């Protein structure tokens, strides 16, 4: 019985040792595997995030470019429109505001000034634009600041003075 007990115990101890070892090895394997998977996951995630960032950036840059372009085109359109509208307004105003006697004069020389002056005399577009937009600005500004607004008649006189570099009375 004593001997059987000892053999049994040895067997059990040996078995326990092997099982313990197997457990430890298995655990080590699982932990190593978990570590590798975790690492792979992190690397994959980092890659995806980096990619997402790059794609996002590309999208934003593309969008910014498109918006910039749209803005520039829109601005150009608005300026062109303002120019055309301002020109039409100036001609209309000149005709309407008691300048019936200078109508023929306006048509030949005034129109040449409005339409062809820039072309003939090589004045810059900016000056012509400044003329139209600047007056509009002055009127709006004067209104805002509570000053007397520049009237169409004053504008007309001023434009004539600019054209002939003489008072309007002298010209007429």
Image (tube, grey):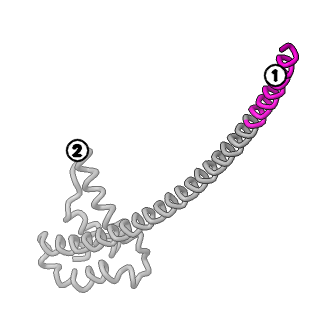
Crowding around mark 2 (Cα neighbors within 10 Å: few <14, some 14 to 19, many 20+) is few
| Label whose residue precedes the other's in the sequence (1 or 2) | 1
Residue 44 shown left or right of residue 10 in the figure: left
Q: Is residue 85 magenta?
A: no
Residue 34 percent coordinates (x, y)? 68, 40
The residue that appears at 26% across and 44% down in the rendered structure is 145
Disc 1 marks which residue?
A: 8
**Disc 1: CA contacts within 10 A as few (<14), some (14-19) or many (>=20):** few
Nearer to me, 58 or 28: 28
Give residue 130's position: percent from left, percent from top. Answer: 37, 65
Residue displayed at 41% across by 69% down: 126
Tell me which residue sits at (15%, 75%) in the image. Answer: 95
Q: How many marks?
A: 2
Residue sticking out furthest to the top: 2
Q: Range of the magenta residues?
A: 1-26
Q: Position of residue 47 (x, y in %)?
A: 63, 53
What secondary structure prevails in the magenta region?
A: helix
Q: Secondary structure at mark 1?
A: helix
The residue beneath circle 2 is 146
């Amino acid at each position: 019985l004593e001997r059987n007990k000892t053999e049994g115990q040895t067997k059990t101890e040996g078995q326990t040792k092997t099982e313990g070892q197997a457990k430890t090895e298995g655990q080590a394997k699982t932990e190593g595997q978990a570590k590798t998977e975790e690492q792979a996951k992190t690397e994959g995630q980092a890659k995806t995030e980096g990619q997402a960032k790059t794609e996002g950036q590309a999208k934003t840059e593309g969008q910014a470019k498109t918006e910039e372009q749209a803005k520039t085109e829109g601005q150009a359109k608005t300026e062109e429109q303002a120019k055309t509208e301002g020109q039409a307004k100036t001609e209309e105003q000149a005709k309407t505001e008691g300048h019936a006697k200078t109508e023929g004069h306006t048509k030949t020389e005034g129109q040449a000034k409005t339409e062809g002056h820039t072309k003939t005399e090589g004045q810059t577009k900016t000056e012509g634009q400044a003329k139209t937009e600047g007056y509009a600005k002055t009127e709006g500004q004067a209104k805002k600041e509570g000053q007397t607004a520049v009237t169409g008649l004053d504008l007309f006189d001023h434009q004539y003075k600019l054209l002939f570099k003489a008072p309007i009375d002298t010209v007429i």
